[in-house]
Amino acid sequence: MNNSATTRMISKIALEYNGNDKGMAKLAAVNFLLGSKPEDQFQEMKIVADRNSKVKKWALTGYISPPEEIGKSLSDSELTDIAIEALKKVGVTELNQFRLDIHNSTKQKHIHFVVNRMNIHGKCTVKSHRIGERFGEAVRQICKERNLKTDVEIGIEKKAEMMKNLTESLRTSNNFEELISKMKAKGFDVQLSSNVKDGISGMRIIMEKDKNPNTERQYKAGYTLSQISNKLKISEIKLLFEIKQTFSKNLQTAKNLNDLQQKMQQDGFKMRFQYKGEYKSNQKNEIQDVFINKIYQNVQNQPKDGFFNKKFGGFSLSAIDSNFADIGDLNSRNQTITISSKKAEDTILEVAEELIEDVLKPTFVAPQEDDWWKKKRRR
Protein backbone atom coordinates (compact mmCIF):
# COMPACT_ATOMS: atom_id res chain seq x y z
CA MET A 1 0.00 0.00 0.00
CA ASN A 2 1.33 3.43 -0.87
CA ASN A 3 1.65 5.60 2.21
CA SER A 4 3.08 8.85 3.46
CA ALA A 5 3.58 10.51 6.83
CA THR A 6 5.22 13.83 7.63
CA THR A 7 5.39 16.28 10.51
CA ARG A 8 4.49 19.90 9.86
CA MET A 9 2.80 23.02 11.12
CA ILE A 10 -0.74 23.11 9.71
CA SER A 11 -3.68 25.47 9.36
CA LYS A 12 -7.37 24.69 9.30
CA ILE A 13 -7.05 24.05 5.54
CA ALA A 14 -5.53 20.63 6.28
CA LEU A 15 -8.61 19.55 8.19
CA GLU A 16 -10.91 21.11 5.61
CA TYR A 17 -9.18 19.12 2.86
CA ASN A 18 -9.50 15.91 4.86
CA GLY A 19 -13.18 16.42 5.43
CA ASN A 20 -14.09 17.52 1.90
CA ASP A 21 -12.91 15.37 -1.05
CA LYS A 22 -15.35 17.09 -3.42
CA GLY A 23 -18.10 16.50 -0.92
CA MET A 24 -17.46 12.74 -0.92
CA ALA A 25 -15.23 12.38 2.17
CA LYS A 26 -16.41 9.98 4.83
CA LEU A 27 -15.42 10.57 8.46
CA ALA A 28 -13.71 7.35 9.56
CA ALA A 29 -12.52 8.12 13.08
CA VAL A 30 -12.11 11.03 15.47
CA ASN A 31 -10.43 11.21 18.88
CA PHE A 32 -10.60 13.90 21.60
CA LEU A 33 -12.25 16.42 19.31
CA LEU A 34 -15.60 17.88 20.31
CA GLY A 35 -16.38 20.14 17.37
CA SER A 36 -17.84 18.81 14.13
CA LYS A 37 -16.50 21.53 11.82
CA PRO A 38 -12.86 21.49 10.58
CA GLU A 39 -12.19 25.04 11.79
CA ASP A 40 -13.43 24.17 15.31
CA GLN A 41 -11.37 20.97 15.38
CA PHE A 42 -8.28 22.90 14.28
CA GLN A 43 -8.70 25.36 17.17
CA GLU A 44 -9.00 22.48 19.63
CA MET A 45 -5.80 20.92 18.28
CA LYS A 46 -3.95 24.24 18.29
CA ILE A 47 -4.81 24.88 21.95
CA VAL A 48 -3.31 21.52 22.92
CA ALA A 49 -0.28 22.00 20.65
CA ASP A 50 0.49 25.38 22.26
CA ARG A 51 1.01 23.61 25.60
CA ASN A 52 4.39 22.50 24.24
CA SER A 53 6.23 25.52 22.87
CA LYS A 54 9.32 23.47 21.97
CA VAL A 55 7.58 21.65 19.11
CA LYS A 56 6.84 23.81 16.06
CA LYS A 57 5.75 21.11 13.61
CA TRP A 58 3.06 19.82 15.90
CA ALA A 59 0.91 17.91 13.39
CA LEU A 60 1.41 14.52 11.76
CA THR A 61 -0.33 14.26 8.40
CA GLY A 62 -0.39 11.63 5.70
CA TYR A 63 -2.37 8.91 4.00
CA ILE A 64 -2.59 5.22 3.16
CA SER A 65 -3.60 4.38 -0.40
CA PRO A 66 -4.15 0.69 -1.20
CA PRO A 67 -3.93 -0.33 -4.86
CA GLU A 68 -7.26 -0.62 -6.62
CA GLU A 69 -7.31 -4.41 -6.57
CA ILE A 70 -6.78 -4.47 -2.77
CA GLY A 71 -8.88 -1.40 -1.99
CA LYS A 72 -11.96 -3.01 -3.51
CA SER A 73 -11.76 -5.91 -1.08
CA LEU A 74 -11.12 -3.75 2.00
CA SER A 75 -14.09 -2.38 3.92
CA ASP A 76 -13.92 1.17 5.24
CA SER A 77 -13.63 -0.13 8.81
CA GLU A 78 -10.74 -2.45 7.85
CA LEU A 79 -8.86 0.40 6.16
CA THR A 80 -9.49 2.58 9.22
CA ASP A 81 -8.20 -0.12 11.58
CA ILE A 82 -5.02 -0.46 9.51
CA ALA A 83 -4.41 3.29 9.66
CA ILE A 84 -5.02 3.55 13.43
CA GLU A 85 -2.85 0.51 14.14
CA ALA A 86 -0.01 1.97 12.03
CA LEU A 87 -0.32 5.32 13.80
CA LYS A 88 -0.06 3.60 17.18
CA LYS A 89 3.18 1.94 16.08
CA VAL A 90 4.78 5.38 15.50
CA GLY A 91 3.70 6.81 18.86
CA VAL A 92 0.06 7.92 18.60
CA THR A 93 -1.80 7.10 21.83
CA GLU A 94 -5.38 7.14 23.00
CA LEU A 95 -4.69 10.63 24.40
CA ASN A 96 -3.69 12.16 21.03
CA GLN A 97 -6.22 14.13 19.00
CA PHE A 98 -6.75 12.89 15.46
CA ARG A 99 -9.16 12.83 12.58
CA LEU A 100 -9.26 10.21 9.81
CA ASP A 101 -11.27 10.54 6.60
CA ILE A 102 -11.78 8.11 3.73
CA HIS A 103 -11.75 9.62 0.24
CA ASN A 104 -13.72 8.02 -2.57
CA SER A 105 -13.74 10.66 -5.31
CA THR A 106 -11.09 8.74 -7.29
CA LYS A 107 -10.99 5.11 -8.40
CA GLN A 108 -8.53 4.32 -5.60
CA LYS A 109 -10.07 4.56 -2.15
CA HIS A 110 -7.59 5.98 0.35
CA ILE A 111 -7.55 7.31 3.91
CA HIS A 112 -6.09 10.62 5.15
CA PHE A 113 -5.17 11.49 8.70
CA VAL A 114 -4.35 14.59 10.76
CA VAL A 115 -2.85 13.87 14.18
CA ASN A 116 -1.73 16.13 17.00
CA ARG A 117 1.74 14.95 18.03
CA MET A 118 1.07 16.34 21.50
CA ASN A 119 -1.27 14.40 23.75
CA ILE A 120 -3.87 16.30 25.77
CA HIS A 121 -1.23 16.87 28.51
CA GLY A 122 1.14 18.59 26.08
CA LYS A 123 3.64 15.74 25.80
CA CYS A 124 5.01 14.96 22.32
CA THR A 125 4.49 11.23 21.78
CA VAL A 126 5.36 11.06 18.05
CA LYS A 127 9.04 11.54 17.24
CA SER A 128 9.76 13.22 13.91
CA HIS A 129 12.99 11.28 13.21
CA ARG A 130 12.51 9.06 10.11
CA ILE A 131 8.75 9.36 10.54
CA GLY A 132 7.93 8.58 6.92
CA GLU A 133 10.18 5.51 6.92
CA ARG A 134 8.89 4.32 10.29
CA PHE A 135 5.27 4.75 9.26
CA GLY A 136 5.91 2.82 6.05
CA GLU A 137 7.51 -0.02 8.02
CA ALA A 138 4.48 -0.07 10.32
CA VAL A 139 2.04 -0.30 7.39
CA ARG A 140 4.07 -3.11 5.82
CA GLN A 141 4.14 -5.06 9.08
CA ILE A 142 0.36 -4.79 9.45
CA CYS A 143 -0.16 -5.86 5.83
CA LYS A 144 1.94 -8.98 6.39
CA GLU A 145 -0.03 -9.82 9.51
CA ARG A 146 -3.25 -9.51 7.49
CA ASN A 147 -1.90 -11.39 4.45
CA LEU A 148 -2.09 -8.28 2.27
CA LYS A 149 0.56 -7.36 -0.28
CA THR A 150 2.92 -4.67 0.96
CA ASP A 151 3.89 -1.61 -1.04
CA VAL A 152 7.34 -3.17 -1.54
CA GLU A 153 5.90 -6.40 -2.97
CA ILE A 154 3.50 -4.48 -5.19
CA GLY A 155 6.37 -2.23 -6.30
CA ILE A 156 8.49 -5.24 -7.32
CA GLU A 157 5.64 -6.61 -9.43
CA LYS A 158 5.00 -3.24 -11.08
CA LYS A 159 8.68 -2.66 -11.85
CA ALA A 160 8.94 -6.09 -13.44
CA GLU A 161 5.90 -5.35 -15.59
CA MET A 162 7.32 -1.95 -16.57
CA MET A 163 10.68 -3.46 -17.48
CA LYS A 164 9.07 -6.16 -19.60
CA ASN A 165 6.97 -3.66 -21.55
CA LEU A 166 9.85 -1.16 -21.84
CA THR A 167 12.26 -3.69 -23.36
CA GLU A 168 9.56 -4.94 -25.73
CA SER A 169 8.81 -1.36 -26.83
CA LEU A 170 12.50 -0.56 -27.30
CA ARG A 171 12.78 -3.41 -29.82
CA THR A 172 10.07 -1.85 -31.98
CA SER A 173 11.02 1.82 -31.52
CA ASN A 174 13.66 3.91 -33.28
CA ASN A 175 13.42 7.05 -31.15
CA PHE A 176 11.92 8.39 -27.93
CA GLU A 177 8.73 9.62 -29.59
CA GLU A 178 7.96 6.13 -30.86
CA LEU A 179 8.85 4.66 -27.47
CA ILE A 180 6.45 6.98 -25.65
CA SER A 181 3.67 6.18 -28.12
CA LYS A 182 4.15 2.40 -27.88
CA MET A 183 4.31 2.46 -24.09
CA LYS A 184 1.16 4.58 -23.98
CA ALA A 185 -0.63 1.92 -26.04
CA LYS A 186 0.38 -0.60 -23.37
CA GLY A 187 -1.04 1.57 -20.56
CA PHE A 188 2.11 3.39 -19.43
CA ASP A 189 2.96 7.08 -19.32
CA VAL A 190 6.66 7.71 -20.08
CA GLN A 191 7.89 11.09 -18.86
CA LEU A 192 11.34 12.30 -19.96
CA SER A 193 13.54 14.83 -18.19
CA SER A 194 16.36 16.76 -19.82
CA ASN A 195 19.15 19.23 -19.16
CA VAL A 196 21.32 21.55 -21.24
CA LYS A 197 24.43 19.38 -21.03
CA ASP A 198 23.07 15.91 -21.84
CA GLY A 199 19.73 16.56 -23.52
CA ILE A 200 17.42 13.73 -22.43
CA SER A 201 18.82 12.71 -19.06
CA GLY A 202 16.11 10.77 -17.23
CA MET A 203 12.90 8.79 -17.48
CA ARG A 204 9.92 8.08 -15.24
CA ILE A 205 7.34 5.42 -16.08
CA ILE A 206 3.84 5.55 -14.62
CA MET A 207 1.02 3.06 -14.96
CA GLU A 208 -2.00 4.99 -16.18
CA LYS A 209 -4.22 3.12 -13.71
CA ASP A 210 -2.03 4.30 -10.81
CA LYS A 211 -2.48 8.01 -11.45
CA ASN A 212 -4.26 9.63 -8.51
CA PRO A 213 -4.68 13.42 -8.68
CA ASN A 214 -5.65 13.55 -5.00
CA THR A 215 -2.25 12.37 -3.83
CA GLU A 216 0.04 13.87 -6.49
CA ARG A 217 1.45 16.47 -4.14
CA GLN A 218 2.43 13.92 -1.49
CA TYR A 219 3.22 10.93 -3.65
CA LYS A 220 4.72 10.96 -7.14
CA ALA A 221 3.37 7.97 -9.01
CA GLY A 222 5.54 5.61 -11.00
CA TYR A 223 9.25 4.89 -10.89
CA THR A 224 12.39 6.39 -12.40
CA LEU A 225 14.43 4.25 -14.77
CA SER A 226 17.12 3.81 -12.10
CA GLN A 227 14.47 2.49 -9.69
CA ILE A 228 13.20 0.01 -12.28
CA SER A 229 16.62 -1.30 -13.37
CA ASN A 230 20.17 -0.83 -12.16
CA LYS A 231 21.51 -1.99 -15.54
CA LEU A 232 19.49 -0.14 -18.16
CA LYS A 233 20.56 3.52 -18.27
CA ILE A 234 19.18 6.41 -20.29
CA SER A 235 22.59 6.72 -22.00
CA GLU A 236 22.31 3.10 -23.18
CA ILE A 237 18.85 3.74 -24.61
CA LYS A 238 20.14 6.80 -26.48
CA LEU A 239 23.02 4.77 -27.93
CA LEU A 240 20.61 1.96 -28.82
CA PHE A 241 18.48 4.37 -30.86
CA GLU A 242 21.58 5.84 -32.51
CA ILE A 243 22.74 2.37 -33.60
CA LYS A 244 19.34 1.36 -34.96
CA GLN A 245 18.99 4.59 -36.93
CA THR A 246 22.54 4.41 -38.29
CA PHE A 247 22.24 0.74 -39.26
CA SER A 248 18.88 1.27 -40.96
CA LYS A 249 20.21 4.24 -42.94
CA ASN A 250 23.32 2.40 -44.15
CA LEU A 251 21.49 -0.84 -44.88
CA GLN A 252 19.33 0.95 -47.45
CA THR A 253 22.32 2.02 -49.54
CA ALA A 254 24.93 -0.70 -48.89
CA LYS A 255 25.76 -2.91 -51.88
CA ASN A 256 27.22 -5.75 -49.84
CA LEU A 257 28.51 -6.58 -46.37
CA ASN A 258 31.91 -5.01 -46.94
CA ASP A 259 30.23 -1.82 -48.04
CA LEU A 260 27.89 -1.93 -45.03
CA GLN A 261 30.79 -2.41 -42.63
CA GLN A 262 32.67 0.50 -44.13
CA LYS A 263 29.68 2.80 -43.97
CA MET A 264 29.09 1.88 -40.33
CA GLN A 265 32.74 2.49 -39.51
CA GLN A 266 32.60 5.90 -41.16
CA ASP A 267 29.71 6.69 -38.79
CA GLY A 268 31.74 5.56 -35.78
CA PHE A 269 30.61 1.96 -35.32
CA LYS A 270 32.27 -1.40 -35.81
CA MET A 271 30.14 -4.32 -36.86
CA ARG A 272 30.69 -8.05 -36.46
CA PHE A 273 28.70 -10.96 -37.80
CA GLN A 274 27.67 -14.15 -36.09
CA TYR A 275 27.06 -16.95 -38.54
CA LYS A 276 24.94 -20.06 -38.29
CA GLY A 277 27.28 -22.94 -37.65
CA GLU A 278 31.02 -22.86 -38.21
CA TYR A 279 32.44 -20.10 -40.39
CA LYS A 280 33.93 -21.41 -43.63
CA SER A 281 36.33 -19.37 -45.73
CA ASN A 282 35.73 -18.56 -49.40
CA GLN A 283 32.02 -19.31 -49.37
CA LYS A 284 28.78 -17.62 -48.40
CA ASN A 285 27.91 -18.09 -44.71
CA GLU A 286 24.39 -17.54 -43.39
CA ILE A 287 24.20 -14.64 -40.92
CA GLN A 288 22.47 -15.33 -37.62
CA ASP A 289 23.09 -12.07 -35.79
CA VAL A 290 24.96 -8.79 -36.05
CA PHE A 291 26.86 -7.17 -33.16
CA ILE A 292 27.47 -3.43 -33.31
CA ASN A 293 29.72 -1.47 -30.99
CA LYS A 294 30.59 2.20 -30.88
CA ILE A 295 34.23 2.95 -31.68
CA TYR A 296 36.02 4.72 -28.82
CA GLN A 297 39.49 6.18 -29.24
CA ASN A 298 40.17 5.50 -25.56
CA VAL A 299 39.03 2.08 -24.39
CA GLN A 300 38.54 3.47 -20.87
CA ASN A 301 35.74 5.63 -22.25
CA GLN A 302 33.71 2.57 -23.19
CA PRO A 303 30.54 2.25 -21.09
CA LYS A 304 30.32 -0.65 -18.68
CA ASP A 305 28.10 -3.62 -19.36
CA GLY A 306 24.47 -2.57 -19.54
CA PHE A 307 21.18 -4.33 -20.09
CA PHE A 308 21.64 -4.73 -23.86
CA ASN A 309 25.18 -3.49 -24.38
CA LYS A 310 28.22 -5.59 -23.54
CA LYS A 311 31.39 -3.57 -23.06
CA PHE A 312 33.43 -5.48 -25.66
CA GLY A 313 30.66 -7.25 -27.52
CA GLY A 314 28.38 -4.31 -28.28
CA PHE A 315 24.66 -4.54 -29.06
CA SER A 316 23.05 -7.65 -30.52
CA LEU A 317 20.86 -6.39 -33.34
CA SER A 318 18.45 -9.29 -32.92
CA ALA A 319 17.97 -8.27 -29.26
CA ILE A 320 17.31 -4.58 -29.87
CA ASP A 321 15.44 -4.60 -33.18
CA SER A 322 12.36 -6.72 -33.83
CA ASN A 323 12.76 -6.08 -37.58
CA PHE A 324 15.96 -8.10 -37.55
CA ALA A 325 13.88 -11.28 -37.26
CA ASP A 326 13.79 -11.19 -41.06
CA ILE A 327 17.41 -10.99 -42.19
CA GLY A 328 16.83 -12.32 -45.67
CA ASP A 329 17.86 -9.00 -47.20
CA LEU A 330 21.10 -8.96 -45.22
CA ASN A 331 21.94 -12.55 -46.15
CA SER A 332 21.29 -11.76 -49.81
CA ARG A 333 24.10 -9.19 -49.63
CA ASN A 334 26.48 -11.67 -48.05
CA GLN A 335 29.63 -12.35 -50.02
CA THR A 336 32.96 -13.97 -49.46
CA ILE A 337 35.32 -11.58 -47.71
CA THR A 338 39.03 -11.94 -48.41
CA ILE A 339 41.12 -10.95 -45.42
CA SER A 340 44.90 -10.55 -45.26
CA SER A 341 46.83 -12.82 -42.91
CA LYS A 342 47.01 -12.02 -39.25
CA LYS A 343 50.00 -10.20 -37.80
CA ALA A 344 51.98 -11.96 -35.10
CA GLU A 345 51.91 -9.11 -32.62
CA ASP A 346 48.62 -8.50 -30.80
CA THR A 347 48.18 -5.92 -28.09
CA ILE A 348 47.05 -7.06 -24.64
CA LEU A 349 43.78 -5.24 -25.19
CA GLU A 350 43.08 -7.05 -28.46
CA VAL A 351 43.74 -10.43 -26.86
CA ALA A 352 41.45 -9.55 -23.97
CA GLU A 353 38.72 -8.48 -26.40
CA GLU A 354 38.92 -11.77 -28.27
CA LEU A 355 38.80 -13.82 -25.07
CA ILE A 356 35.75 -11.96 -23.80
CA GLU A 357 34.01 -12.15 -27.15
CA ASP A 358 34.70 -15.89 -27.39
CA VAL A 359 32.97 -16.37 -24.04
CA LEU A 360 30.01 -14.21 -25.02
CA LYS A 361 29.52 -15.50 -28.56
CA PRO A 362 31.61 -18.54 -29.45
CA THR A 363 30.37 -18.59 -33.05
CA PHE A 364 31.65 -15.15 -34.05
CA VAL A 365 33.14 -14.75 -37.50
CA ALA A 366 36.56 -16.30 -38.04
CA PRO A 367 39.64 -14.53 -36.57
CA GLN A 368 40.63 -13.22 -39.99
CA GLU A 369 37.73 -10.78 -39.94
CA ASP A 370 38.76 -9.56 -36.47
CA ASP A 371 42.17 -8.80 -37.97
CA TRP A 372 40.57 -6.80 -40.72
CA TRP A 373 38.88 -4.55 -38.15
CA LYS A 374 41.98 -4.22 -36.03
CA LYS A 375 43.94 -3.08 -39.06
CA LYS A 376 41.23 -0.58 -39.90
CA ARG A 377 41.37 0.82 -36.39
CA ARG A 378 45.16 1.30 -36.53
CA ARG A 379 45.00 3.43 -39.67
Image: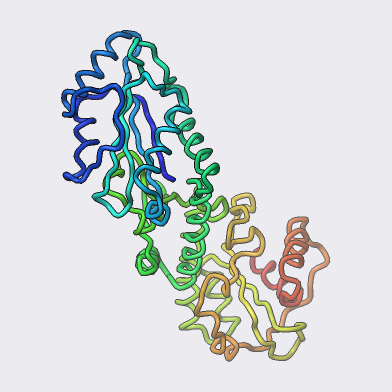
Left or right of 159 in this view: 33? left
Quarter of the picture holding the N terminus: top left
Task: Locate residue 179, reporting x and y percent.
Answer: 40, 66
Left or right of 343 in this view: 244? left
Kindly identify the residue that appears in the image at 32 percent across and 49 percent down.
Answer: 109
Can you say whether 181 is above or below 233 in the image?
below
Tell me the quarter of the picture where residue 259 sits.
Answer: bottom right
Tell me the quarter of the picture where residue 103 sits.
Answer: top left
The furthest residue to the right: 344
Task: Locate residue 40, reporting x and y percent.
Answer: 17, 23
Please tell me which residue lies in front, 314 or 268: 314
Kindly identify the residue that appears in the image at 17 percent across and 45 percent down.
Answer: 22
Task: Locate residue 329, reporting x and y percent.
Answer: 54, 88
Please tell me which residue lies in front, 333 or 40: 40
Task: Locate residue 166, reporting x and y percent.
Answer: 47, 63
Kindly identify the residue that appears in the image at 64 percent across and 69 percent down.
Answer: 376
Kindly identify the residue that appears in the image at 19 percent across and 24 percent down.
Answer: 35
Tell me the quarter of the picture where residue 112 sits.
Answer: top left
Can you say whether 76 is above or below 39 in the image?
below
Quarter of the picture holding the C terminus: bottom right
Please tell me which residue lies in front, 346 or 300: 300
Left or right of 239 in this view: 189? left
- Render colour scheme: rainbow
